[in-house]
Image (spheres, helix red, strand yellow):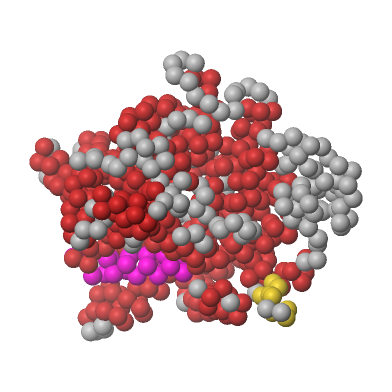
Amino acid sequence: MDFFTHWLTQDLLLILGLGGIAFLLARAARSDRWSRAATRFRADRTGVIALCVVCLYLFIGALETCRVPVGGGATKSMLDFVIGGIPDERSYSAPFSNQILTDTKPQPDPLKSQSHILGTNQLGQDVLVQTLKACRTALIIGGLTSAIYIPLGALFGIFAGYFRRWVDDLIQYIYSTLASIPPILLLVSILFVLGPGLGSISIALGVTGWVGLCRLIRGETMRQSERSYITAARALGQSHWNIISRHLLPNVMHLVLINFVLGFSGIVLSEAILSYLGVGCPVGTASWGVMIDSGRSELSRDPVVWWNLTAATTALFGLVLSLNLLGDSLRKAFDPKRG
Amino acid sequence: MLNYLIRRLLYAVPILLGVIFLTFVLFRVVNTPEHAAINALGPKSSVDARNAWIVNNGRDLPLYKQFATHTIQLATFDFQPSITTKRPMGETFREGVGPSLCVTLPGFILGLCLALVLSLYQVFVRNSAADRTITLICVVMMSLPTMVYIIFGQAVVALGLGWFPVSGFTKGLDAVRFLLLPVAIMAIISLGYDARMFRAVFLEEIAQDYVRTAHAKGLSATRVLSRHVLKNGLIALITLTVGQLPKLIMGTLLIESFFGIPGIGNVMVQGIQTSDEPVVLACAYLGALLYLAALILTDILYAAADPRIRLS
């Protein structure tokens, strides 16, 4: 696993991931349906704003993922260069306050730095910095999970819908089996085996998450297969591979995109629940789920520590809400009659 | 009918076998015997004790024999006892079902009614400002993590206003005091998602020809909605709601754990947090069984509600 934790690998993977998405979108934009959808989407103000917010989160997450060596074997993320250098305190401190909250009573203790805009957490780390850093966790889990479940779901869906017969039966059997186990327990069972870590969470979420997409693509492929252009392609003697990659895949890709956007928000929410159950992010990772979980004990202490929970919830809510709105706008743009 | 039922049951058997196989692979093959022994006996246990555990539990046998015992154990509900509480799973489940249902059943029904009323209202005033506002509120509600509802409810309504106890559970009628807040939260959590889905179902229904006919013969809009659209929409909703039934029995993980309600959801959370493999295995298997039962029930209800679907 040394290979994956190396800064250069992570930088390259980041560039590869973002570049891949940009490339796919650029290719798709050439087709008629997608360019019409893009025109409709540009007129949808909610969708455009949501897209901007999502891009902002992506940008912050990318800054935190992109690491450069600073000598002595240590690495620093680009985000550290922007907002780094804020010193840690000893424990909690409220936003804009210069007192430290210890277990007994607030001490009139001068902080090392001026004050923290969103206060500090139990370990004395700046909450704003932690909230921004957690974008990376969400981005990585969402990105890796999507990289696993989207190819699985789309390909299985197309195979089942195109080949029918025993291929369809087999794929339906596999996903019926997976879907019958309560999802959270299946996730946890896989995580028991894989151990904690961002990679394991993504694998577990990816392996369990493709069923919905597969059903959707299967149904759509079945409908498309009845259309005359597929019959024509078959009559012309095109290979199965050509029909799938040239004709079917481009015609279901918009469903994949919508599913990707809406699925991303589901993954971010799942991470929060897994962190609460103690099988989420490893200790020491900045994650909204972990922050929300610690909010439980912080609200019941006196004086109440509300800033950690509020910051994490707001950040998570902002991302999930914009993803949901973006997904809805995309659906409307691609399918204006039913949207 | 009986014929159909038998065929439907037979269809569920391979899926159940698949579930058994999947759990076997996860818990018995990928999970090494040594790891399982450490999990059961604790990290401080001696090597001899671990080896004895492996032999006692048949984990040194060839895989096909282990698979046979695994299948028989699950098929006869002969679960291994929990590692942490040492209690048999059957007892744990029997005790947990009651408290779980106390929360989930009223919460589910309340949530369903709220979602139905909200979505019907939206369809009634469709494409107006009110409809768009409610849709936006639903998206906002969907975007909040479950924990936030619970933490907010506990901190503000229970702790701040002092209307309800923060957590706990008792037997008898007195339990209502403890249950009101979790039931309310459960009803609200899925409201955004449900209302949106129901709205889509009803909108699809309202575009049908029979609705135009009903309007054309002079029925009032309210009557068309309540008599025709609601009734036909409910058929589509059967699939969406009956599938939720296993969740009612299995309880809600987060609500039960936050409110200290001794249901099955709580058992699962504790099992997960203490890496109690027998508990997770038993819950996963029972959950799958209930899910398959709910699927069959859905099909039967679907056929009963819609005479166009024939069972043969």
Q: Is residue B4 above or below residue A236?
A: above
Asked where in the image residue A43 lies, by quadrant, the reply is bottom right
User: Residue B279, position in %: x, y?
Assistant: 36, 43
Quadrant containing the C terminus of chain B in the rendered view: top left
Q: Residue furthest left?
A: B3
Question: Would you say the magenta stretch is mainly helix, strand or loop?
Answer: helix
Asked where in the image residue A326 lies, by quadrant, the reply is bottom right
Viewer-proximal residue, A53 or A91? A91
Q: Is residue B220 left or right of residue A6?
A: left
Viewer-proximal residue, A250 or A117? A117
Residue A281 visible in the displayed image = yes
Give the total number of marks visible in the rendering.
Answer: 0
User: Residue B77, position in %: x, y?
Assistant: 24, 40
Residue A15 visible in the displayed image = no
Determine the residue positioned at 80% across, 54% down: A89
Q: Is residue A175 left or right of residue A75?
A: left
User: Residue B278, position in %: x, y?
Assistant: 34, 45
User: Residue A322, position in %: x, y?
Assistant: 61, 56
Quadrant containing the N terminus of chain B in the rendered view: top left
Q: Is residue B4 magenta?
A: no
Q: Residue furthest top?
A: B173
Q: Is residue A150 magenta?
A: yes
Viewer-proximal residue, A249 or B292? B292
Q: Is residue A120 above or below residue A23?
A: above
Determine the residue positioned at 24% across, 40% down: B78
Q: Is residue A200 left or right of residue A181?
A: right
Q: Is residue A28 left or right of residue A108?
A: left
Determine the residue positioned at 86% across, 52% down: A111
Determine the residue positioned at 63% across, 61% down: A135
Residue interval drawn in magenta: A146-165
